[in-house]
Amino acid sequence: MCRVTRRPTPEEHLSDLARLRRVRDRIDREYALPLNVEQLARDVHMSAGHLSRAFRRAYGDSPYSYLMTRRIERAMALLRRGDLSVTDVCFEVGCSSLGTFSTRFTELVGMPPSAYRKRAVGDAEGIPSCVVRQVARPIRNQEARRPDRS
C-alpha cells in the first residue's frame, strides 16, 4: 500500500505552530496538574500522534519530555530552598511516582534529587534567581555528565 502525503499549506503550518505554542504554554502553566498527550492533543484538535511528531519537530522534545523537564526545573528550585522533602517536592511538581521522578531527575541533572538537595541548599544564597535558573537548568535528552569515578 502506497501512502501519499502532502506538504501543509503555509496557513496550515502557521495554524499548527499556533496550536503547538498553546500546548507548550499550557504545559508551562499547568505542569503540576495531571496532563497527558491525548488530552493536550484533543484540546487543540489534533491527534496525539500528530501532536507528538509536530511538537518534537518544533521544540526538539516530545510533549511528555518537555513536561517532565518543566517539572524537574521547578523541583530543582524547590529542592534548593531546602524546606521540603524530596517526596513533598515530587508531588508538588505534579509527579505521582517517586521512582519515576527520581529516575528522570537523575537523568537530567546527573545526580539523585536527595544528593542535589544536600548540595544545593544554601549554594544559591545571594545570587539573583534569574542567574540561578539559567545556571541550574536541567540538561535534556539524558546529556547529564556522569561523575568521574577515577
Image (cartoon, grey):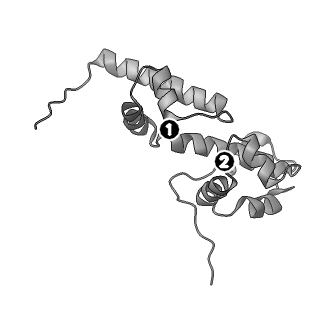
Which numbered tag is attached to residue 63? 1
Label 1: which secondary element: helix
Q: Is the residue 23 above or below the residue 99 in the image? A: above
Q: Which residue is drawn at 63% across and 34% down?
A: 34
Residue 96 percent across, percent down from the top left: 67, 45
Residue 8 percent across, percent down from the top left: 26, 23
Q: Name the residue under label 2.
A: 72
Q: Looking at the image, is mark 1 or mark 2 earlier in the sequence?
A: 1
Q: Can residue 138 be seen in this view?
A: yes
> What's the amino acid at mark 1?
Pro
Q: Which residue lies furthest to the bottom in this view?
A: 150
On-image quarter of the N terminus:
top left
The 10 Å Cα crowd at callout 2, few under 14, some 14 to 19, many 20 or more, is many
Which numbered tag is attached to residue 20? none
Q: Nearer the viewer, residue 71 or 101?
A: 101
**CA gap, disc 1 to disc 2?**
14 Å
Q: Is residue 26 left or right of residue 91?
A: left
Q: Which residue is drawn at 65% across and 28% down?
A: 29
Q: In this view, does 146 lie to the left or right of 58?
A: right
Q: Which residue is drawn at 46% across and 22% down?
A: 19
